[in-house]
Image: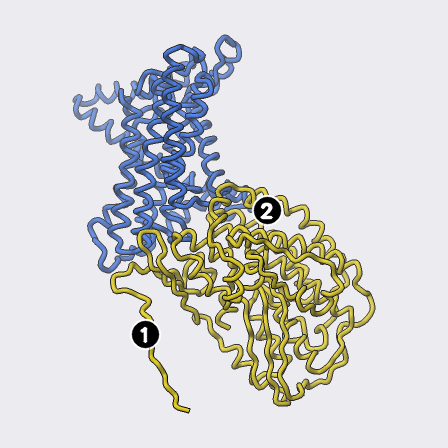
């Protein structure tokens, strides 16, 4: 098993104990809430900025360019500069827009992505809430974002925004099914919806290796459908730049636009983190059953590095998609989901149930 | 003769149509073109192009300029085929005066024509990929176009609007390294062509977006006067270099690229093949280019065309450019009319995009390869 020195549970429990010693139980819980909130807010903002920087570097590599290289070493503070610029921009008020909904929409989008972070196991013992229906919670919360997108498109009183929002609605509702079904594959394998249990079940091999071909198919399907669900290329129809200028956030400016922008990148992080947790073992090191020496060497790498390493590999793949493929058309995209991905997913689920029942996978 | 004007009102718009204005500032119209698109859902019911946002009155301005000055105005029409535009006017003036330009000049002009064509197709490829959402194509196309632009820059100082042609020949001689660098470029670009194929031509999503989209049959192409690669994608054999050879083109061996499907993908393939064909032409020309012969014929300092009407057509990167000059014997043209390819190519867009969806409209608009200043002039 993973070494205890890297476990975050010692750190968190010591903080918990000291807080309980200092103040009354309800006060301690309240303080913990605030602490966790602040940590998440900081993490969210910094990670969002880093992901924007990463995307610009990755696309620069793919496109034969250098990318940001002026602000700070290797341009690492470029996104900070951009963010400060966005903060200082004027918030343009739109005539005849529904003011309340117009202002509400960015918050819904960003809160949806923020809430999903709560259930992610970042490392051993580093998880805000360990629901027994964790995966269900993540799917439910992350699909709330579409409400914000629809409201944004409707309330900004612009035709481009409306078309973008309607596209996004059709897209997310369709692809939600396939995302759920491909995640169900791992739920069937591990027999649990609790994210910590799913990670524990991969101690002697990740599900993508243990689960034979069906698990691999589920992984590929998840990658495709998750890319579609977060509105990224080649499925970025909701903000198809060459067709709808900017889609649902055409009319937004300043910090409200920054909210949409950040939420998009954080959604990418969340789907990648879920892919890493369910298919690639989460924070669990790479273990091969029986190879004790090898497993011990792997244990020396901290679990938080394993988690972020895997997540960023998936993020890189998703970015790679965007910068290589042309965009699909809306009807082709819905065809792809309803005619190919969904039947394939259903079939795959049946096969996986059969595999699990017969015990055909590596245990 | 009694003149009777019948006022016929054509109702284009209904009251409750869902109209979306694409442009004049829109990423995929490539300039200040405004398309008034009527939608039902995502489907395009009809589309009215509005032009004139960049009208500069080039034809009117030309009436008070000498023939040498007119050359500089033609640059600003189709700025991606500026050299070929220059040549059209030069050829018309030379023909009117009966001047024989040296063979070397004809060779250099043809080499520059083909380089311009490749550079233009490179830029079109970049922008077409962008229209379809493949953002990386832009940088690959621009990378290769840059090499051509540096050849231009080396020889005549400017990269885009090089008024290098002048009636009777060229402004000055080309750079001594011109031949060497052109050959190097041909070798370089042949190696880079597989990139184009791997990135976009063989992509499944790209096929879905273009095959069978915006089908224009041969008859429609002829009726609308769609020329250039867009027309040849419909099987309309309209290459002026073959049909009415000018300059050195009757001595060069090359194929006229024809596809008969008439969809966006056929138009795409025509341009991709034309780039290869241009490379073949370049190889033949550079090898046979004479070293001696000067860069201009002997011309009078003030050019006055004899009274009459003159017409010359050339094949630009986008189709047939016609120059019609009416002269009254003065040093200024009495009237100049340009038959620009993009003007004709634009108006087929409504017919092609009807019944498709917005994404198709963008794909068709990209595959017609429109340059807006050439439409407005």
Residue B9 is labelled as 1
Q: Colour of chain A?
A: blue
Q: Nearer the viewer, residue B13 or B125?
A: B13
Which residue is tagged 2? B196
Q: Which callout, 2 or 1, points at the residue further toward the start of the chain?
A: 1
Q: Nearer the viewer, residue A125 or B369?
A: B369
- Chain letter for the residue marked with disc 2 in the picture: B
Q: Are marks 2 and 1 on the same chain?
A: yes
Answer left or right for A176 relative to B333: left
Residue A214 is labelled as none
Q: Residue at x 21, y 25 (%)?
A: A29
Q: Is residue A147 above or below residue A286?
A: below
Colour treatment of the image: by chain
Instruction: Describe the element under mark 1 as helix, strand or loop.
Output: loop
Q: Colour of chain B?
A: yellow
Estimate the spatial distance between the alpha carbons at disc 2 and disc 1, rounded to whole Å: 49 Å
């Amino acid at each position: 098993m993973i070494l205890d020195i890297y476990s975050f549970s010692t750190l968190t429990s010591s903080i918990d104990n000291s807080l309980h010693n200092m103040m009354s139980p309800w006060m301690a819980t309240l303080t913990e809430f605030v602490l966790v909130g602040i940590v998440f807010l900081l993490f969210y903002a910094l990670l969002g900025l880093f992901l924007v920087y990463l995307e610009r570097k990755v696309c620069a590599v793919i496109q034969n360019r250098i990318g940001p290289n002026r602000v700070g070493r290797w341009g690492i503070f470029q996104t900070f500069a951009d963010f400060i610029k966005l903060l200082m921009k004027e918030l343009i008020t739109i005539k005849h827009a529904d003011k309340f909904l117009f202002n509400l929409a960015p918050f819904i989008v960003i809160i949806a992505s923020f809430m999903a972070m709560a259930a992610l196991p970042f490392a051993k013992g580093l998880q805000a809430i360990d629901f027994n229906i964790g995966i269900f919670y993540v799917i439910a919360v992350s699909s709330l974002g579409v409400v914000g997108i629809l409201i944004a498109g409707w309330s900004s009183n612009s035709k481009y925004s409306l078309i973008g929002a309607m596209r996004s609605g059709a897209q997310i509702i369709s692809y939600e099914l396939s995302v759920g079904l491909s995640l169900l594959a791992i739920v069937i394998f591990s027999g649990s919806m609790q994210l910590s249990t799913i990670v524990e079940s991969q101690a002697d091999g990740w599900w993508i290796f243990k689960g034979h071909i069906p698990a691999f198919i589920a992984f590929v399907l998840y990658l495709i459908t998750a890319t579609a669900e977060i509105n990224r290329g080649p499925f970025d129809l909701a903000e198809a730049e060459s067709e709808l200028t900017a889609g649902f956030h055409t009319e937004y400016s300043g910090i409200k636009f920054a909210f949409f922008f950040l939420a998009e990148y954080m959604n990418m992080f969340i789907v990648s983190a879920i892919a890493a947790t369910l298919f690639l073992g989460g924070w669990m090191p790479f273990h091969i059953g029986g190879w004790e020496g090898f497993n011990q060497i792997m244990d020396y790498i901290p679990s938080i590095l394993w988690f972020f390493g895997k997540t960023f590999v998936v993020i890189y793949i998703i970015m790679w998609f965007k910068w290589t493929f042309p965009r699909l058309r809306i009807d082709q995209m819905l065809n792809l989901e309803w005619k190919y991905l969904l039947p394939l997913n259903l079939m795959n689920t049946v096969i996986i149930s059969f595999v699990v029942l017969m015990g055909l996978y590596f245990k | 003769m009694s003149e009777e004007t019948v006022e016929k009102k054509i109702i284009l718009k209904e009251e409750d149509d869902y109209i979306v204005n694409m442009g004049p500032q829109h990423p995929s119209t490539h300039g200040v073109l405004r398309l008034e698109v009527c939608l039902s859902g995502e489907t395009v019911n009809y589309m009215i192009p509005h032009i004139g946002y960049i009208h500069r009155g080039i034809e009117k301005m030309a009436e008070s300029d000498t023939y040498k000055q007119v050359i500089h105005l033609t640059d600003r029409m189709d700025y991606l085929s500026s050299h070929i535009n220059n040549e059209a006017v030069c050829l018309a003036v030379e023909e009117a005066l009966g001047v024989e330009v040296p063979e070397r000049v004809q060779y250099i002009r043809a080499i520059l024509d083909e380089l311009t064509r490749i550079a233009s197709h490179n830029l079109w490829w970049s922008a077409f990929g962008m229209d379809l959402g493949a953002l990386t194509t832009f940088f690959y196309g621009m990378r290769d176009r840059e090499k051509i632009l540096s050849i231009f820059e080396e020889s005549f100082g400017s990269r885009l609007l090089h008024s290098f042609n002048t009636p009777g020949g060229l402004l000055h001689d080309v750079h001594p390294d011109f031949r060497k660098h052109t050959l190097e470029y041909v070798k370089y670009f042949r190696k880079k062509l597989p990139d184009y194929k791997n990135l976009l031509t063989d992509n499944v999503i790209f096929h879905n977006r273009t095959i069978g989209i915006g089908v224009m049959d041969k008859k429609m192409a002829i009726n609308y006067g769609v020329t250039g690669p867009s027309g040849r994608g419909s099987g309309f054999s309209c290459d002026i270099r073959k049909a009415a050879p000018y300059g050195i083109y009757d001595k060069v061996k090359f194929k006229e690229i024809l596809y008969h499907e008439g969809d966006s993908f056929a138009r795409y393939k025509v341009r991709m093949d034309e780039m290869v064909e241009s490379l073949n032409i370049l190889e033949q020309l550079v090898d046979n280019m004479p070293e001696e012969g000067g860069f201009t014929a002997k011309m009078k300092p003030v050019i006055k065309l004899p009274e009459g009407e003159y017409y010359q057509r050339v094949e630009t990167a986008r189709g047939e450019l016609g120059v019609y000059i009416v002269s009254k014997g003065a040093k200024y043209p009495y009237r100049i009319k340009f038959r620009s390819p993009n003007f004709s190519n634009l108006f087929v867009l409504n017919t092609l995009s009807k019944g498709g969806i917005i994404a198709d409209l963008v794909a068709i608009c990209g595959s017609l390869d429109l340059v807006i200043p050439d439409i407005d002039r």
